[in-house]
């Protein structure tokens, strides 16, 4: 396999012949070839090949072939030959998401993030965003939304992509059988699609159960009975009740048991932190069942005594990505300090975003680096265990990890489509860019646009 980059030009000549500079032909090991199959995404065409004397890596394509293969643009692109008989231009990277009517913000609130992602490798790859309704399966084309270099967006019809990065934002939509079938069609065509769907909290528990990484998962019970909740409170003294499909800390209760004073429930209501006390367990359960229909679709999770600053618990968001070598790397870490009286460490409920260095040096002093490295190793171990047991391809993970007062590391949440709020911290902007670059590199890995030394 031979990989390089080249500049694509259009020629008005009528014959089905592409013209390569001798330099490009040598790089692709095509110097003695007279015809090749030219591929762009799912489209291909059999063409003649002629060499031209010109410095550099240049590829001249007839206008008719440009139209037939729907090559999105001229200019620089990666180009690969697997066997000396074909040329693939690309990669064509499709981002599956929801599309709005707006011309200036076609992906709604995610427009800025997707434009930022498309900048990684934009000088040598083709990016577009699309929704399920943009795909024409019979013609194997997509009405993609491409970024303009001068700003704004433009729609172009292109072949099915080489790889699909799933950023569909709706949990509800992803649960539909029609959406699952839609994604399966890419897989059946041999087109890799990663970040298949949002995880439910219980999915993660089941995927990790029986692995070495399971010792980092707190005791948990789905749709807990009042007996299970009572038993967990007697054993752990506090627990969390979390909606199975929740995010952003919405709907979470922190329930505490004090043998002398009774039961306490902390939660968030109408934008405020609420604390209620109950002298009897039955009164606590009446409130919980009244609010949450007998706790259906909830998980009861063991409470952990986390490390603290100013009597406020600290947890960490680890953002992991795959890289070009198909290995998990920790791309960024944010430390989150809980707000006073808050049930979670989310910034929207009063939490504070800090760097792990700020937190760990304050708590562990000279041992901070050792503690952080241990947490990184644990995060990668968790990612590898999830990946082994998940039947779909993963490319990104967000973990909410905590360190208890005995330095044991716990995993509270795993998100297969992690948000990027930690990268808003000024000290983490570099990690934010690195995370996007890793995802781009993983697209190269999945689409087989990488050199042998990287494979």
Image (spheres, rainbow, N blue to C red):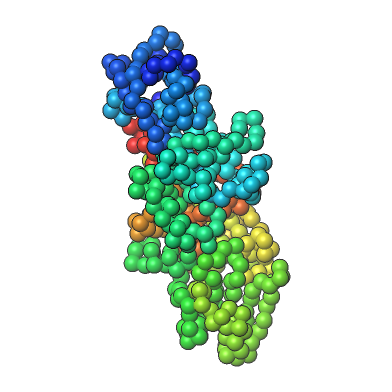
* Residue 447 in the image, given as x and y percentages of width and height: 39, 38
**Quadrant housing the N terminus:** top left
Q: Is residue 46 left or right of residue 168?
A: left
| Residue in view at x 66 percent, y 71 percent | 268
* Residue 353 in the image, given as x and y percentages of width and height: 64, 55
Residue 190: name its quadrant. Answer: top left
* Nearest the eye: 347 or 153: 153
Using the rendered image of the protein, determine whether residue 63 is visible from the camera's viewpoint: yes
Residue 45: name its quadrant. Answer: top left
Q: Is residue 118 left or right of residue 383?
A: right
Above or below residue 105? Residue 125 is above
* Residue 449 in the image, given as x and y percentages of width and height: 39, 34
| Residue in view at x 42 percent, y 40 percent | 140
* Nearest the eye: 71 or 68: 68
Q: Is residue 439 left or right of residue 348?
A: left
Using the rendered image of the protein, determine whether residue 438 is visible from the camera's viewpoint: no
**Quadrant housing the C terminus:** top left
* Residue 60 in the image, given as x and y percentages of width and height: 44, 18
| Residue in view at x 44 percent, y 61 percent | 177
| Residue in view at x 61 percent, y 52 percent | 421
């Amino acid at each position: 396999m031979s990989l390089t980059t080249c500049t694509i030009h259009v020629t008005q000549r009528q014959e089905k012949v592409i013209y390569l500079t001798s330099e490009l032909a040598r790089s692709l090991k095509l110097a003695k070839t007279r015809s090749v199959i030219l591929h762009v995404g799912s489209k291909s065409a059999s063409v003649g090949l002629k060499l031209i004397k010109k410095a550099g890596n240049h590829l001249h394509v007839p206008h008719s072939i440009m139209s037939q293969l729907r090559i999105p643009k001229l200019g620089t692109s990666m180009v690969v030959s697997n066997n000396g008989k074909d040329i693939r231009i690309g990669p064509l990277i499709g981002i599956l998401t929801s599309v709005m009517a707006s011309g200036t913000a076609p992906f709604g609130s995610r427009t800025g993030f997707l434009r930022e992602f498309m900048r990684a490798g934009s000088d040598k790859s083709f990016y577009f965003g699309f929704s399920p309704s943009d795909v024409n399966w019979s013609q194997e084309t997509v009405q993609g939304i491409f970024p303009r270099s001068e700003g704004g967006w433009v729609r172009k019809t292109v072949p099915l992509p080489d790889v699909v990065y799933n950023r569909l934002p709706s949990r509800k939509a992803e649960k539909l059988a029609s959406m699952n079938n839609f994604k399966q069609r890419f897989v059946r065509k041999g087109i890799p699609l990663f970040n298949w769907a949002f995880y439910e909290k219980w999915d993660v528990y089941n995927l990790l159960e029986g692995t070495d990484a399971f010792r980092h998962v707190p005791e948990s019970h789905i749709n807990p009975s009042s007996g299970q909740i009572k038993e967990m409170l007697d054993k752990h003294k506090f627990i969390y009740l979390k909606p199975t499909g929740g995010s952003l800390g919405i709907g979470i209760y922190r329930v505490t048991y004090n043998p002398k004073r009774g039961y306490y429930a902390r939660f968030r209501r109408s934008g405020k932190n609420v604390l209620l006390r109950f002298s009897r367990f039955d009164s606590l359960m009446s409130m919980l069942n009244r609010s949450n229909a007998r706790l259906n679709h909830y998980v009861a999770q063991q409470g952990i005594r986390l490390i603290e600053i100013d009597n406020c618990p600290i947890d960490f968001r680890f953002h992991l990505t795959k890289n070009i070598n198909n290995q998990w790397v920790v791309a960024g870490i944010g430390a989150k300090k809980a707000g006073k009286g808050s049930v979670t460490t989310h910034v929207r409920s009063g939490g504070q975003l800090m760097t792990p260095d700020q937190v760990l040096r304050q708590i562990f002093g000279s041992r901070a680096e050792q503690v952080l490295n241990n947490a990184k190793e644990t995060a990668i171990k968790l990612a590898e265990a999830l990946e082994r047991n998940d039947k779909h391809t993963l490319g990104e993970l967000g973990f909410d990890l905590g360190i208890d007062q005995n330095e044991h590391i716990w995993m509270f949440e795993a998100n297969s489509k992690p948000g990027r709020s930690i990268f808003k911290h000024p000290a983490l902007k570099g990690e934010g860019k690195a995370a996007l670059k890793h995802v781009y590199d993983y697209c190269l890995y999945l689409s087989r646009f990488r050199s042998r030394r990287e494979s």
